[in-house]
Amino acid sequence: MLQVKIPATSANLGPGFDCLGMALQLYNRITVETNRPFRITLSGSYKEGIPTDDTNLVWKTMCHFWDLINYPIPNLDLTFENFIPPARGLGSSSAAIVGGLVTANTLAGSPYTKLELLQVANALEGHPDNVTPALYGGVTLSVSTENGVLPRILTQSPNFKAVVTIPNMHLNTKKARGILPDQVHRKDAVFNISHVSLLTEAFIRGDYSLLKEGMRDTLHQNQRAALIPGLLETLEAALETGAYGSALSGSGPTLLALIPDNLEKDVPLSMTKALERHGINATALVLDID
Ligand code: HSE
């Protein structure tokens, strides 16, 4: 039997659109029994709408990998235990892709290194900011170079917790990317370049007093506020309650706040209340960084 555990991830962290991300201690689990007739069984909190035939994303990714390396598709009995909510900005599709690749690679005798798996994961997902932390853990920077994605781990076990406030609505990443303009103003580009630099310093030095300013963004959050009622007010409410910083998680609708331990109750409450004022029910989880 083989078991693979893949973390949820939060991408962008404010200004780091398509390049910054962090892994969270919330997992999907893949269990494999070999030499059994093909079967996919779903368990965990999220099963609805997830196919159990050959259109399943984890399985499709596994077959894609074996195809790449010319490996025959084995007979497997698979159980996918899902605790990462789908279509909420917590990296569920990256978890499926990374989980599929790590499982398929292990079953084939690990011909690919982690860095090689990252390149395949990035090509399948289309952007590296979730797949890098899902593979490496910690808070990560993904640099897209001529030779593929260069992954950097900025910090592995930071001294803060992540509040993920999950609105009771789905948001498709394609739609949330589709509303962003193709071109940006120079002053907005400069704003984000300088803020990602500040944020990188904050994570590397462990100076969380820099997170509040460092997590500000001009490239996507204001634009996506049109799709998520109460987005900007909720991020502000988290800061007013003492969070180090706050941002939209990935393409949303989940909202992320980074907090010291003593605000585990106050920040989730202020965020869910702010969303409630906009008619949105939400569930808040307090998670450690993976
Ligand atoms: N960087 C991506 C986006 C993350 O914001 O569209 C999507 O999960």
Image: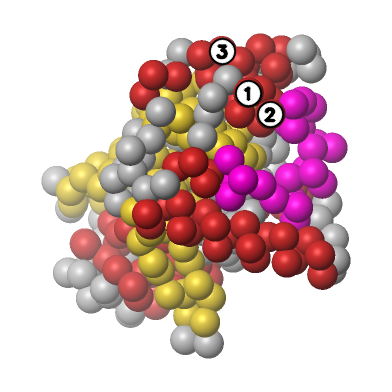
Give the distance between the C-alpha atoms of the residues marked 1 and 3, in whole angstroms: 12 Å
Give the distance between the C-alpha atoms of the residues marked 3 and 2, in whole angstroms: 13 Å
Picture quadrant where residue 117 is located: bottom left
- Of mark 1 and mark 3, the one earlier in the sequence is 1
Q: Position of 93 compared to 186: left or right?
A: left
Mark 3 Cα-neighbour bin, 10 Å: few <14, some 14–19, many ≥20: some
Q: Position of residue 60 (x, y in %)?
A: 46, 58
Picture quadrant where residue 75 is located: bottom left
Q: Position of 156 compared to 246: left or right?
A: left
On screen, 185 above or below 149?
above
Q: What's the residue type where badge 3 is placed?
A: Leu
Q: Which residues are magenta?
A: 212-233
On screen, 84 above or below 204?
above
Circle 3: element type = helix
Q: Which mark is residue 236?
A: 2
Q: Which mark is residue 269?
A: 3
Q: Which mark is residue 240?
A: 1
For the residues carrying marks 3 and 2, which lies nearer the camera in this image?
A: 2
Q: How many numbered circles are shown?
A: 3
Residue occupying the point 70% across, 19% down = 275
